[in-house]
Amino acid sequence: MSLPARRVSESTVRRLSLYLRVLEELAREGESTVSSRALASRAGTTAAQVRKDLSLFGSFGKRGLGYAVPPLAEQLRAIMGLSRKWRVVLVGAGRIGTALFEYPHFRERGFEIVAILDDDPVKVGKEWRGVRIRPGAELEAAAREGGAEMAILAVPAAVAQRLTDALVAAGVRGILNFVPLQLQVPEGITVNNVNMAVELESLAFALQAPAAHSGRPRSDKAI
Amino acid sequence: MSLPARRVSESTVRRLSLYLRVLEELAREGESTVSSRALASRAGTTAAQVRKDLSLFGSFGKRGLGYAVPPLAEQLRAIMGLSRKWRVVLVGAGRIGTALFEYPHFRERGFEIVAILDDDPVKVGKEWRGVRIRPGAELEAAAREGGAEMAILAVPAAVAQRLTDALVAAGVRGILNFVPLQLQVPEGITVNNVNMAVELESLAFALQAPAAHSGRPRSDKAI
DNA sequence: AAGTGTGAAGCTATTCACAGCC
DNA sequence: GGCTGTGAATAGCTTCACACTT
């Protein structure tokens, strides 16, 4: 079964995504089975954690053997909602927007850009892989016409909330937010924040106060 | 005092970075004090959480009044290790590397790029703001000469571990890793992973299984 | 009256450890 | 013998609630 028995924590979801990546690597390497220990080691967590995470969704392994690689990958894709296409609107075609647009993984995983918005007059009207770049003012119409379900928001802070409101009005339910700002959204809308400043600064903290940050998990008893 | 009394969790560190951003906004808006409630609201957490986080490092507020904005910002900069410059080597000058290089916040916060490496022959030899781009093979020498303390790693997966080893050999102690791969590093080296695939896929999970993901915190009793 | 600082309680996540199956 | 699945134990984080200060 792949029905979530109970609440699934954000950390579990993020690990599932890592497991999926490892499984696809293993499949390319021709491995047919993998133990929780091996999977954990490549994903940077513990064997017990792998088993716990997977057990939330069903029993996918065989005792004494481990997990069959391709079927488990397929299960994880189903669990994560990656067996279908997702229509995505790209709001902001600057550096980060472009990087994501060209990220190969993006399309391989079934994320399809259905609209691109940007206010740069040099960009407006251009086509990227058949999608015409439109000015920000047309966001709501563009998102609605494209049937966008999620958005990537990578715009200047000053316009971020206004564009968020337009996205919500257009029926978008999930936003990957690169703007270093807490977006206000109604209940039921998911915002996933990626904040480069936080990433950098937490690295600075770790280096300047090496004794003060919490440790990392090890693997199972025997190495 | 700004000495970390005890272990500081990763989540606390990330929130401190958010608080700092909010405080700097407030300072620009001319606010001289802020309550934990107001700070929490702009940072997307709870008032109790703000007070708990700050209390790990000292007593910065005045009862009945709140926190003085500029002094608290200064304290947070000291706590986070942002009162000094950090020498950073940029490994990979592709889309993401470029985006970070041009991220204004990066330089404002005292992160200084001392070396840039890339194997693209079109880029090698060019100068970006006075820093010459060198081929990947020169990474260890370049990092050592520049006295790099941290690195931004944004290269193809195939070369990531080799370059990581070179970074470690050159004395780099912190890596902001954009490569979707678990880097192997010795004890004492901090790796901060940013994985776009994880971000996108966890958004897909949230949208496809809306009932199954854990909720968000509210603010203090009264709104 | 407003708002911090903090012990205690509550809750969530991780790790342990072992019964059970291959 | 190897390895999963999982209840129980532990650890860690968040929220509560209130004494105390301005």
Image (spheres, coloured by chain):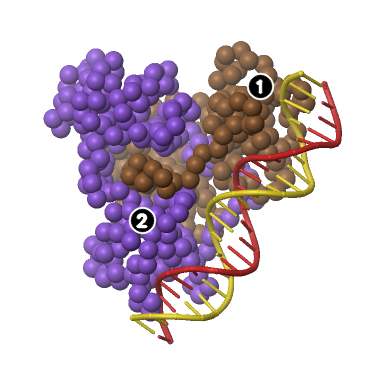
Chain colours: A purple, B brown, C yellow, D red
Please count the marks in the image. Answer: 2
Which quadrant of the rendered structure holds the N terminus of chain A? Answer: bottom left
Q: Position of residue B27 (x, y in %)?
A: 60, 17
Q: Is residue A65 above or below residue B9?
A: below
Q: Nearer the viewer, residue B34 or B101?
A: B34
Q: Position of residue B69 (x, y in %)?
A: 66, 21
Amino acid type of the residue tagged 2 in the rendering = Leu
Q: Is residue B222 above or below residue A26?
A: above
Q: Which mark is residue B157?
A: none
**Residue for badge 2:** A3
Point out the frontmost of discs 1 and 2: 2
Q: Is residue B17 above or below residue A85?
A: above
Q: Nearer the viewer, residue B161 or B191?
A: B191
CA gap between label 1 and label 2 equals: 45 Å
Instruction: Examine the image and state in which quarter residue D15 appears.
Output: top right
Q: Position of residue A102 (x, y in %)?
A: 24, 37
Q: In this view, which residue lies farthest toward the left?
A: A130
User: Would you say B82 lies left or right of A97 here?
Assistant: right
Q: Position of residue C10 (x, y in %)?
A: 65, 49
User: Would you say A136 lies left or right of B88 here?
Assistant: left
The crowd level at tag 2 (other Cα within 10 Å; few <14, some 14-19, many 20+) is few
Amino acid type of the residue tagged 1 in the rendering = Val
Q: Nearer the viewer, residue B130 or D22?
A: D22
The residue at the point 57 percent across, 14 percent down is: B29
Q: Secondary structure at mark 1?
A: strand
For the residues tagged 1 and 2, is the chain the same?
A: no
Q: Chain of mark 1?
A: B
The residue at the point 48 percent across, 28 percent down is: A182
**Residue for badge 1:** B34
